[in-house]
Every structure is written in structure tokens, then in C-alpha cells.
Image (tube, coloured by chain):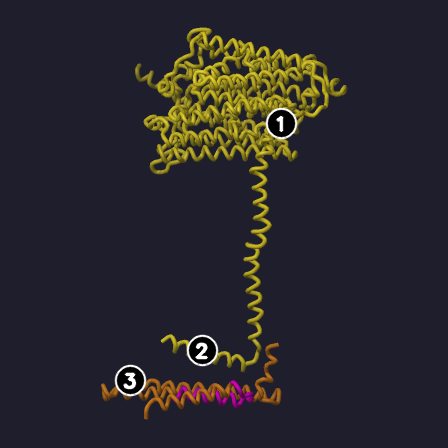
Chain colours: A yellow, B orange
Amino acid sequence: MAFCIRLECGIQELNMNNLVYLVPLLPLAGFLINGLGRNYLSKGLVSLIGCGTIAASFVISLVLFFEVKTGHNTLATAFTFIPAQHLKIPFSFLIDPLSSLFLLIITGVGFLIHLYSTSYMHDEAPPHFARYFAYLNLFVFSMLLLVMGSNFIIMFIGWEGVGLCSYLLIGYWFKNTEYTNAAKKAFVMNRIGDLGFLLAIFWMVQQFGSTGFAEVFGKAGALASNDRVLVGITMLLFIGATGKSAQIPLYTWLPDAMAGPTPVSALIHAATMVTAGIYMIARSNLLYTLAPTTQGVVAVIGLATAIFAASIALKQNDIKKVLAYSTVSQLGYMFLGLGVGAYTGAVFHVMTHAFFKALLFLGAGSVIHAMHHEQDIRKMGGLSKYLPITHITFLLGCLAIAGIPPFSGFFSKDEILNAAYEKNPVLYYIGLGGALMTAFYMFRLYAMTFRGKFRGTHDREHHLHESPAPMTTPLIILAILAAVGGFLGVPEIFAKNAHWLEHFLAPVFVASTERVKHEPLAHSTEWTLLGVSVILILGIIIFAWNKFSRYVETGKEETGFGKILANKWYVDEFYDAIINRPLRGFSLFLNNVVEKSAIDGIVNGVGKVVNYGSRQLRLLQSGQVGSYILLMVIATVVFFIIQLFMK
Amino acid sequence: MPINYYIFLATALFCIGVVGVLTRRNAIIIFMCVELMLNAVNLLLIAFSKMHHLAALSYDAKTTVGTEAQLFVFFIMVVAAAEVSVGLAIIVMMYRNIHSVDVNFLNRLKH
């Protein structure tokens, strides 16, 4: 009997391991089939393979999730990836609460976006359609590697993979030079951050002799708080995160990345890839808890990014640009959460943000689809009549991101801001300012798009239509999730022990929460903060709604401060002036001066000297036997004399 | 006789030969000068050989050490004779073709 049970357990464990491998392998298979067969497969088959593999991954992720929920983590080692004497890096996957939650977000939201893409990209030629789905599947594969890896090396492989896919998908319409430039910009910016991550890994190997999460955190736990090494490693990791998650100073690639197809923006540049930095810091939460200096930097950078990007979003007129800056801003909030030690809050916000921002992007895609690729909100207006489903779902997304109870954004943002208040009320006030700006620009966007009168051409108005079912279904599902997703993390003040997510993630953050004792805010304070913020946000929403529903195109240029915001604080110009131009000037100097005069001079000079010398030596070969003999005699005499003097 | 005399004589002969080769244009005279240089060398070989042999005799009355060089002299004379026969043949051919034995006349070969 006992034997039977053991056998059963063994089989189950084996199955679990195999299932774990299947999660990333299925999208990889989808990538290979779609990528290699892009010239032969029909669009229907490509869609089926692309969506089917992700759907299967999602189902397996659900199974894994319920397994994890019983408190049973899975560590599946495939093989030893790098065996180097004392350093052994296994190719292994870790399924614990944090990674299983990310698995669900990636495969779940990923599946909806794949489904949406089948319709959104339908105008593409079959080979390009297949290429798109191949890239998308490869992206999901890389992202799964990133969150499933049980050590920093596997995470880094996924980290690079998602960067590559991001590059490929931003430049998907590669015939447009502007788009390929945006792709290159994203890639280069990411590489700057990746270097930080890589250096952090090297340092870890040197310091801890391992890159496995368990070993590194175990050994780091023995170090003193704010140890020089820990601060260094966490700072380098954070540099990696600023690149991938678009934080100051490396955020400028994300708004440009909107050059890619809209579903790509929803999947990569809103819901999943850009949250990789948050995942990485949440994963290494112990390191950050032990390095309060870095935590302070993370909080300040996060908050600065949050309000900086929000201020830019106030004046943007491209529907996707507004959402892009909003994403940068929301990522800033997540980093603020990580910086003040609210790891659960940050992960919670990742989840709710994945819902509502994917929803908003897909909604924007639906609008762009209806408007025949017009993205300027000044030429929209009154679309609620023509796109009823998109309108309702978009409104829900806006309410969620603005933080109106009981929608999801309210709970997650509130958790982060409360944690910020505990740390330092100043952080809270600035963060609240950012939240008010968020409410303002989101409802400016909403009102200018869906309210008022249509401002486009008559011809375009005639063609307005609601998107087909494969596009509206993901919108509806995401809208439901964005509306109710917040109930996974209901704060203490509403109901005792209702914060399901905190209990679920507790094992991951236990080492940090044990070390930092924090005094929860008094309930009265919390109620006050909550009430004030909700009233302020509501006020802003009503103001923006009224103001921009009556928006009339004036054609006036922005002036003063508005102009600075509309031009994104001239950050791109600033980078151009301090980095690009000096670099280009230096290269030109090297090319025109150093290359031409020094290097070419040396090379040509050698040739010239040999040429001239041989032309002169040639004259000695006169053909006169007498002169040869004379030279010979002279030479002999010279050697003779030399020999005399040498002795 | 001291060895110095032989050396001076040989050197003088050799220099006359060199100068002759360098300055004269008549192929036959150049040839004679070459022979002069060869013979200067022969003279030196004999002189040194004799000196060497005498020095060795003072240690051992029956030794043949130092006589080898005299063999070389014969070799040189044989080689010189062979060389002369070839050289004179060339000069005869030269005279037949250009009716002159002036070596400067032959530098046309270089063109």
C-alpha cells in the first residue's frame, strides 16, 4: 500500500515536472512551426497554432497554479547548463506563488491578445501574418523563461529574448525607416540596462559562487544591512530594470515603441515585458530589503518617473502615446511600491495594470482599426455611438486606471500609496499628484475620443464600425478582469483577512517581511487618505470630462509650459545633444582626421618609402660589370675596416 | 725569411689584380689580372702552410701538419686552368661576334 502511494507520488511529481517544461515549450513549438512554415501555412492555420499553443500553456499554468496554491512549489531541473568546476548553473524552472502568478498573467493576457491579433492583423499578407505570430510566440516563450527560471542566468536568457522580440515586433513594418529606428532605439536602450544586469550576475557569481535564487538569497541573508556588495548588486540590477521597465533615465524608448502593431504594444509594452524589471526586483526582494540605500533610490526614481511621464501624457495627442506615457508612469508607481517595501502591492499593481492597460491598448487598437489607422485624438470624438462595446470597455479601463473604487486600479494603487505614506508622507503627496494627473489625462483621452462630436472627415465617419468578435471578446474579458481584479487584494480596512494576494505571495516575501517591522496606519488615517484621494480624483474626472467633451479644434500652437510638455520636456533633444551629437562629432573626427591623416598616412607612408627607396636602389643596377666589382671591393674594404675596429 | 714579406708581396699582387680588373677594359688583361689575384692567394697559402709546418716540426720531427694547404694550391691551379679554358673560349667567341675584346661593349645585355 505504502509502495503504491509512493509510486503514485512519483508519477505525479514526474507529471508536474513534464508539465512545467511544456509551458515554455509549447510557444516555442508554435514559433518554430509558424516561423519555418510561414510561406506554406494559411492564415487560419497560423492563427490556430499561434493562439492554440498559448491557450494550452494557459491551461497548464492554471494546473500549476492550483498545485502551488496547495503550498507545493515545483523545482524542475532539465540539465546542467553551465558546468564549470565549482560553478554549476542548472537549466531549471521554479514554480512558486510569484512565478505562477506571472505565468497566469503572461499566458492569460497573452492568449487574449493573440486572439485579438488574428483579427487586427488580418490585412497582412500570409507570410507576414505568420511572421507576426512567430515573433509573438517567441516573445511569450522568452517571457516564460524569464519568470520561470530558478536562477539569474535563465532569467537573463529570457530577459534578452524578450528584448529581441520587442525589437522585432516594433520594427514589424520594417519598410518604414522611422519604425525601424524606433526598434533600434528600444534595443540599444535595453542593452544599456542589460549590461547592468549582466554585471550584477558576474558580481553575484564572484561573491556568492552561484546564481540560483535559493543560494544567493540564503548567502545574502547572512550579510549586514547596507553591505557594500549588496548595494552594488542591487543598484546594478536596478539599472537593468530601468532599461527593461522604462524608468528614468532610460524610458525614452517606450513611447517610440508605439511604432509596432497595437496588440504588440498591449502585450509587450504594457502588460508583460515592461513588468520584467518589477518581477526581477520582487524576486530579489531580500537583497533590496537588505540594501535600504538602493531601496531609497528605487523609490525616488520610480516616483520621479511616475509624475514626469504623467505630466508628458497630459499634452499628447496621439492615442497610443498617451497610453505609452501612462504605462511609464504606472511602472513608476510599481517601482515606488518596491522602493517602499510594498512588494505585494507592486506585484498586485503589475497584475491589475496588465488587465486595464492591455484593455486600454486593445481598445485603442479597436478605435484605430475603425478610424483606418488614424491615431490623432483631435480628429476623433463622438465614437461612443459607433463603437459601443469598445466605448464601454474603454471607460471601464479608464475608471480602473484612475483609481475609482471598486475597480481594480483603486486597490492596487491605494496599497502602494499607503505604503509610501507609512514610509514618508511626502512620497504620498507627490504620488497622489501623479494619480490626479493620471485621472486627468485618461479622461481627457476618453472624452476626446468618445464624447462630443466627430471631428474627422465625413468620409471617415461613414466608414466607422464596431470591430469584429475576435477583437471585442478580449475587450469584454479584460474589462471584466479590470473591473473585479481588485477584489483579490481588498485592504484590511474593508474586511479582515480579505487580501487574498498577500496570503498567496507571503512565502515569497517572508524573508523581507520578517526583517522589516512596519506599523500599519491607523484606520482613521487610512480612511481619510482614501476619502480625500477618491474625492479629488472624482473632481478631476468630472472637470476633464466636461472640458474635453466640448473640445473644439482650434489649431492653436501650445505655448509656455504646455509647449514644453507637448514636446516631452525636450528629453529626446537633450539626449541627442549630450550623447548622440558629441558621439557623432567624435566619430566624424576619427573618420576624417585620425583615419585620413594618421592611419592612412602610416599605411601609405610605408608604401611610399619602399617605392621611393627601390626606385633609387634600382639605379645601382647599371649593368656595368666594372661598377659591380668596384662596389664589391669597396664593401669588402669597409667590412675589413669595421672588423679591424671591432677587434 | 719572415712571413711578413710574403704577405706584403701577396697583398701587392692582389691589389694590382683588383685595380687591373677595375680599370682595364680589355677582357684579356682583366683575365690576366684575375689570374694574378688567384696566384696571390696561392702564394699566401704556400707561405702560411710552410710557416705552420715549421712550427709543428719543432714539436714532432715527422709530422705532416700544415702541409694540407699545399694541396689546395694544386686544386686552385687546376680549377684556374679549367676556368681559363672556358674564359678564353668566351673571349674568342666575343671577338668573333663583335670584333673587339672591350668588356664595356657588352653591357648591352642589360637592356
Q: In 3D space, how far apart are the residues under numbered discs 3 and 2 (Cα atoms)?
A: 34 Å
| A9 horizontally vs A253: left or right | left
Q: Position of residue A606 (x, y in %)?
A: 54, 61
Whether labels 3 and 2 share one chain: no
Q: Position of residue A195 (x, y in %)?
A: 47, 35
Q: Is residue B32 magenta?
A: yes
Callout 1 crowding tier (Cα within 10 Å): few <14, some 14–19, many ≥20: some
Task: Report the disc number at residue A638.
Answer: 2
Whether labels 2 and 1 share one chain: yes
Q: In 3D space, how far apart are the residues under numbered discs 3 and 1 (Cα atoms)?
A: 109 Å
* Circle 3 residue: B65
Q: Position of residue A336 (x, y in %)?
A: 48, 21
From the viewer's side, name the closer residue of A179 and A87: A179
Number of the front mark, 3 or 2: 2
From the viewer's side, name the closer residue of A458 and A26: A458
Among the two numbered marks 2 and 1 on one chain, the one whose residue lies closer to the N terminus? 1
Compared with A462, A184 (above or below) is below
Task: Report the disc number at residue A564.
Answer: 1
> Can residue A67 be seen in the rendering of this structure?
no
Number of marks: 3
Find out whether the residues at labels 3 and 1 contact each other: C-beta distance under 8 Å. Answer: no
From the viewer's side, name the closer residue of A395 and A542: A542
Range covered by the magenta-colored residues:
B22-43
